[in-house]
Image: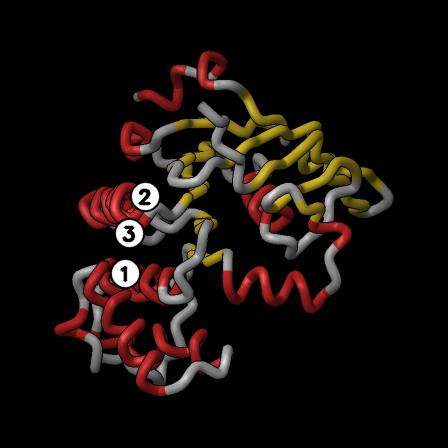
Amino acid sequence: MSRVQRLLAAVDVERRYDLDSEEVHALRGVNLNVFPGQFIAVVGRSGSGKTSLLNIMAGLDKPSDGKVLFEEQDLAEMSEQDLTDLRRHRIGFIFQSFGLLPLLSAFENVELPLRIRGMNSGERAERTREALDIVGLWTRSRHRPYELSGGEQQRVAIARAIVIRPSLILADEPTGELDSNNAHAIFGLFKDMVIKQGISVVSATHDSTLLSMADEVKEIRDGQLLEHAEIGLRFRD
């Protein structure tokens, strides 16, 4: 039986910044494998390196040392156009702040990545409805963001991420602005997408109550990624 090929890998990733003549280590020798259809939660306090890791995994930032491989291709060797194409077709993003355009309806916000790709209107409409159905918001598709609750806005943001039918979703504190019920609903939605759509999800969070839904949990502490057995009990309150 052949071994499943990893989708993405961070290999000995280091990220250093110069801040006021002082060198800051945001990431220290991080190694992480993401396989198809896997839900990984990366837990850590604010400033621990979660966002730096996600940005590097997405090719939005470059490591100081080490490398990131997407389907075994080094992101550092890709052209800017290749990286843009990767983010438009293969990697979806979800952020804490939702990032919806206020003058567009939920439908138009979700449809926007397909417009940017130049997709024809019929296929755009079909894909957008499919994505909104997955997150349970088709009946609210004509509403603008200010007419939606926080949980609904985050569902629209998720629909916008999955409308491109990505292989991987990177989510940076996607429940940070939500109450506990909505936070659980969003993580439950991630779990469903992994199972039913075969999408891989890597989500950064500081909320320990959500970790049981992930297939694998990693803790990032002072820029170092710890194995599950090393995760501190303080994240299991």
* Residue drawn at 81 percent across, 38 percent down: 23
Residue on which disc 1 sits: 155
Percent position of residue 111, x then y: 36, 77
Residue type at mark 2 is Val
Q: Residue at x 24, y 58 (%)?
A: 151
Tell me: residue 17, above or below residue 127: above
Q: Determine which residue is flagged by label 3.
A: 178
Percent position (x, y) of residue 65? 79, 37
Q: Quadrant of residue 187?
A: top left
Name the secondary structure under disc 1. helix
Earlier in the chain: of badge 2 and badge 1, it is 1
Element under disc 2: helix
Which x, y percent locates residue 76? 75, 50
| Callout in the foreground (2, 3) | 2
Colour mapping used in the image: secondary structure
Q: Nearer the viewer, mark 2 or mark 1?
A: 2
Q: Residues within 10 Å of mark 1 (few under 14, many from 20)?
A: many
Instruction: Assess disc 3: are there few (<14), some (14-19) or many (≥20) residues with their C-alpha within 10 Å of its C-alpha.
Output: some
Query: Residue 119 vs residue 211: left or right?
Result: right
The CA distance from mark 2 to mark 3 is 21 Å
Question: Which circle's residue, 2 or 3, is located before the other in the chain?
Answer: 3
Q: Does residue 227 appear to the left or right of 124 in the view shown?
A: right
| Label 2, residues with CA under 10 Å away: few <14, some 14-19, many ≥20 | many
Q: Quadrant of residue 156?
A: bottom left
Which residue corresponds to mark 2?
194
Q: How far apart are the alpha carbons under marks 3 and 1?
A: 11 Å
Q: Is residue 52 visible?
A: no
Q: Relative to 102, is 33 on the left or the right? A: right
Check the image and report above or below for 78 versus 15.
Answer: below
- The amino acid marked with disc number 3 is Leu
Label 3 or label 1, whichever lies nearer to me, is: 1
